[in-house]
Image: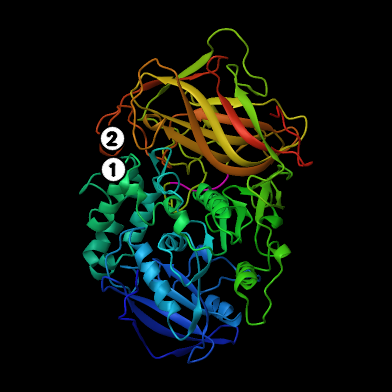
């Protein structure tokens, strides 16, 4: 594969004076891609004429000179804008390139979310690597979409790629985490499409297009799902409407989902053998992605891979709370893992590329795994009105940690969750009606870009006036007849878990297809601040049952037949303190995080009718159901039912 020889046109450099009195040189470079589209970037350097240095590349669809919330705060708690961010790394001995993705910002071409980033990224890296101001080494960095584009370009084996800092993204399989999960469609894609259509070139060019978008009542549109072409809040920008509906309509895992940019798993063997760091948050939709990328590259490459997981929402590493729960001053990256995010990245890059000081960093500064074990706080309400859940950072050599043991907790008909499997007796089962017209509401979880209809993070599992789709009286989700609740007795000692969460269910349904959802919860006991206790969500998952055996070849269910299914929830790490309960909720919907199964067996993206399904969860010795978690056994808390 060769890079376009047309190169780029560099404009005159300008010296940018920074608020702290420093300065950095910035010039615009325009790089032609293989199809002739020209992408625009800023090149930052220490001098007017940049010397040959390693180059740090960030590609973004959000505007190369725009600050995002996920850029975080510096050690003084101040926001850092792109010019200053670039200057920090220039000071460490790098040149920095920030590029607008195709069809966004000042770059030419048509934007199609996620697709085309492999080729554009490859061409950009190889062009940079051949420039006189690059020493031949290009390190990529960036959050969210800017993480996705990194693993996309790595699949084409650019020879100048030297390292990847992949923060909150980088699809291992977009079908299984990020766009879909368990066969269901993640509706954050719909809110993202709407929000960014407002900032599209079409909306900037045409005031009528922008006015049309601004007039839409997005919550009302969510009540009118599924959307159709010409009947959606995106109808004024057909290219955004088309890519969203195309993702929604491809329910099975086929060639559509195996394309570059969506399926890193299919290209790990082609990733360059370079150091990589994968950062993510417990309340982020890319937990499964980060864990898989870390584990796969650790196994497949000689260069080291690293994993960092905090208790944040998407990219909010400088915030100590997530949703309505506070994890304490140790929760933030700043002042704990490094003075701030920029220093953390600079130290990691120095370890693998060196820096201006010649200091390569120390291996002990970067354990292979750093994760935040949530829990251990007072359980009271702090002065900001949030639950004090607490937590602390831990390190490990592997994920799950080498001192974690898989433990099963069995679901019982009396609502208990026990280490003892069910004994011989009746064919115990619980059943409920799942009405797609009345789905279980989403309250927090691993969500990003969901506003204004949903919000990520940790919350008490009881609706409020701000919960989408709910009306008074706001009773706990556990009070719904379509939510099955299983929980332990109050724990006699602390129990700490860290690792994957899997739920094996024996199920049946009256419908040819239906969903089963799971939610793992830490139940705080009542106190003066929370007289009803506090049911804090940790992680949740879903499975669309026609994909129970294969995401590629869906199979309908036969009414009355019992099937064994596995519902995967993203990994988590939490200390269930003495007196708390471990709880698992089982149901059949989680809306608006996921689209709702109409129970007809037909494609949900085009459904015009819905039916009520009678769903069953079996709990007998012949058809048991259980929760699997990984319990830490190093003094963090002994667990029930080892084995």
Apparent side of residue 278 relative to residue 544 in the rendered image (left or right) = right
Apparent side of residue 532 relative to residue 115 in the rendered image (left or right) = right
Query: Mark 2 falls on what kind of element?
Result: loop
What residue would you read off at disc 2? 603
Apparent side of residue 469 relative to residue 163 in the rendered image (left or right) = left
- The residue closer to the viewer here, 33 or 581, is 33
Query: Which mark identifies residue 249?
Result: 1
Q: Position of residue 580 (x, y in %)?
A: 70, 33
Asked if labels 1 and 2 touch by Cβ distance under 8 angstroms, the answer is yes
The type of colouring in the image is: rainbow
Q: Position of residue 372 (x, y in %)?
A: 66, 51
Q: Quadrant of the C terminus?
A: top right
The residue located at (45%, 33%) in the rendering is 440
> Magenta residues: mostly which secondary structure?
loop
The residue located at (72%, 42%) in the rendering is 403
Which span is picked out in magenta?
454-458
């Amino acid at each position: 594969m060769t890079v376009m020889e047309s190169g780029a046109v560099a404009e005159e450099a300008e010296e940018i004076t920074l608020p702290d009195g420093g300065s950095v040189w910035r010039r615009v470079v325009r790089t032609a891609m293989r199809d002739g589209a020209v992408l625009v970037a800023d090149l930052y350097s220490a001098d007017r004429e940049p010397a040959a240095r390693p180059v740090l590349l960030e590609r973004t669809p959000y505007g190369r000179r725009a600050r995002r919330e996920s850029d975080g705060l510096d050690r003084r708690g101040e926001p850092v804008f792109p010019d200053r961010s670039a200057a920090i790394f220039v000071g460490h001995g790098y040149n920095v390139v920030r590029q607008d993705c195709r069809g966004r910002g000042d770059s030419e071409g048509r934007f199609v979310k996620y697709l085309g980033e492999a080729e554009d990224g490859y061409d950009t890296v190889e062009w940079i690597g051949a420039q006189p101001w690059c020493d031949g080494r290009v390190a990529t960095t960036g959050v969210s979409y800017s993480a996705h584009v990194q693993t996309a370009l790595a699949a084409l084996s650019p020879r100048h790629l030297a390292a990847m800092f992949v923060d909150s993204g980088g699809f291992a399989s977009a079908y299984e985490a990020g766009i879909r999960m368990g066969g269901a469609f993640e509706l954050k894609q719909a809110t993202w499409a709407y929000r960014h259509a407002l900032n599209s070139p079409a909306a900037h060019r045409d005031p009528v297009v922008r006015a049309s978008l601004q007039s839409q009542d997005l919550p009302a549109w969510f009540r009118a799902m599924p959307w159709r072409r010409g009947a959606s809040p995106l109808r004024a920008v057909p290219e955004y409407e088309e890519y969203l509906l195309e993702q929604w309509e491809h329910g099975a895992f086929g060639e559509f989902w195996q394309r570059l940019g969506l399926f890193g798993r299919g290209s790990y063997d082609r990733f360059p053998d370079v150091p990589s760091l994968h950062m993510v948050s417990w309340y982020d939709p890319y937990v499964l992605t980060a864990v898989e990328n870390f584990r796969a590259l650790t196994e497949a490459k000689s260069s080291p891979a690293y994993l960092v997981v905090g208790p944040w929402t998407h990219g909010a590493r400088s915030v100590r709370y997530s949703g309505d729960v506070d994890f304490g001053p140790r929760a933030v990256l700043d002042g704990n893992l490094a003075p701030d995010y920029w220093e953390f990245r600079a130290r990691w890059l120095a370890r693998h590329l060196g820096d201006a000081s010649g200091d390569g960093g120390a291996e002990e500064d970067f354990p292979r795994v750093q994760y935040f074990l949530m829990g251990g706080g007072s359980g009271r309400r702090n002065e900001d009105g949030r639950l004090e859940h607490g937590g602390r950072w831990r390190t490990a050599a592997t994920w799950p940690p080498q001192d974690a043991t898989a433990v099963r907790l069995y679901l019982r008909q009396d609502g208990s969750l026990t280490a003892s499997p069910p004994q011989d007796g009746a064919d115990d089962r619980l059943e409920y009606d799942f009405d797609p017209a009345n789905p279980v509401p989403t309250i927090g979880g691993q969500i990003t870009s969901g506003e204004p209809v949903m919000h990520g993070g940790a919350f008490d599992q009881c609706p409020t006036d701000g919960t989408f789709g709910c009306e008074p009286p706001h009773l706990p989700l556990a009070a719904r007849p379509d939510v099955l609740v299983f929980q332990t007795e109050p724990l006699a000692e602390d129990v700490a878990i860290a690792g994957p969460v899997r739920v094996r269910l024996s199920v049946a349904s009256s419908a040819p297809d239906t969903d089963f959802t799971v939610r793992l919860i830490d139940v705080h006991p009542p106190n003066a601040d929370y007289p009803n206790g506090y049911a804090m969500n940790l992680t949740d998952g879903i499975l669309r049952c026609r994909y129970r055996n294969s995401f590629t070849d869906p199979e309908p269910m036969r009414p009355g037949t019992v099937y064994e299914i596995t519902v995967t929830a993203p990994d988590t790490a939490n200390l269930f303190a003495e007196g708390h309960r471990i709880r698992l909720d089982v149901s059949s919907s989680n809306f608006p995080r996921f689209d709702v199964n109409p129970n007809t067996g037909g494609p949900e993206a085009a459904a015009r009718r819905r039916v009520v399904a009678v769903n069953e969860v079996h709990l007998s010795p012949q058809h048991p159901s259980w929760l699997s978690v990984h319990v830490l056994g190093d003094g963090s808390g002994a667990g029930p039912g080892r084995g």
